[in-house]
Amino acid sequence: MLRLLIIFSAITFYSLQIQAQTKGKSGAIIYTGITSAVSEDALLTPEGTAITGYHVGLDARLFSGTMFFGGGIQYHNLTLLATPNAEYFSPEKSHKLVKTRFGLGFNIHQFTHLITLRAKAYGSFNFNLEYDPEMVPENYEYTGAYAGAIGGVGVDIGFIAIDVEYEKGLVNALTQRPDSKLDIWTVSLGFFF
């Protein structure tokens, strides 16, 4: 019985030491991926459609313990009008925006010294850069900026970072359209440098 108690204590201590040493990577990540957005506003995204496109970004992580500060900037090139078919890389009519984002990240579990599972909770400020107002329906005008709250999960595999994020729109994206908050999904693949 004493031997079993010693073995159990040693395993528990070793497990706690591994958990305490769980570290993610600190540094900068450059990444790209695909974007898909929907809204409750039937003018912005009619049922069965989405605003799609691609994004590129640069993020930084500070501190590499269990919790880290994160943030960065993303450039999105999206379809101006919602479509039933995804046009991730070649939107005919495009809408360009820049997102600044910051918040907290959490290294949930370190599987090996190379593989770490992460989660994040960020805030986002989205700034509309360019779109052709002549190409959109009447009463369809983007605000200068809008905001969202981001939740996401990701995994680091060596110097590779893979992320899936969901942004809940907090502020309307269109002027004088009360249900035009954008909910945005992104999938990204990036590299530490």
Image: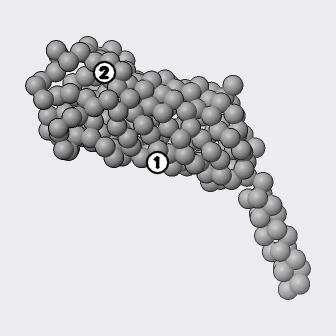
Q: Is residue 18 left or right of residue 124?
A: right
* Residue furthest out toward the bottom: 1
Q: Is residue 165 above or below residue 50?
A: below
Of residues 76 and 5, which is closer to you in this image? 76
Indicate which disc, 1 or 2, sits on the residue closer to the N terminus. 2
Circle 1/circle 2 CB separation < 8 Å: no
Amino acid residing under circle 2: His
Residue neighbourhood size for the residue with mark 2, other residues' Cα within 10 Å, grouped as few (<14), some (14–19), many (≥20): many
Secondary structure of the residue carrying numbered label 1: strand
Measuring from the top left, give residue 190's x and y in whole percent. 57, 28
Q: Which residue is mark 1?
A: 151
Position of 64 with respect to 59 (left or right) is right
| Along the line of sight, the residue nearer the viewer: 174 or 169 | 174
Quickly name the residue at label 2: 95
Visible residue check, residue 88: no
In front of the other: 54 or 101: 101
Quarter assignment of residue 136: top left
The picture places residue 62, in percent across and down from the top left corner, at 68, 41
Amino acid of disc 1: Gly
Residue at screen point 20% across, 44% down: 179
Q: Is residue 128 above or below residue 101?
A: above
Secondary element at image label 2 = strand
Q: Quadrant of residue 94?
A: top left
> Which residue sits at x=10%, y=25%?
138
Of the 4 image quadrants, the one containing the N terminus is bottom right
* 2 to 64, vertically: above or below: below
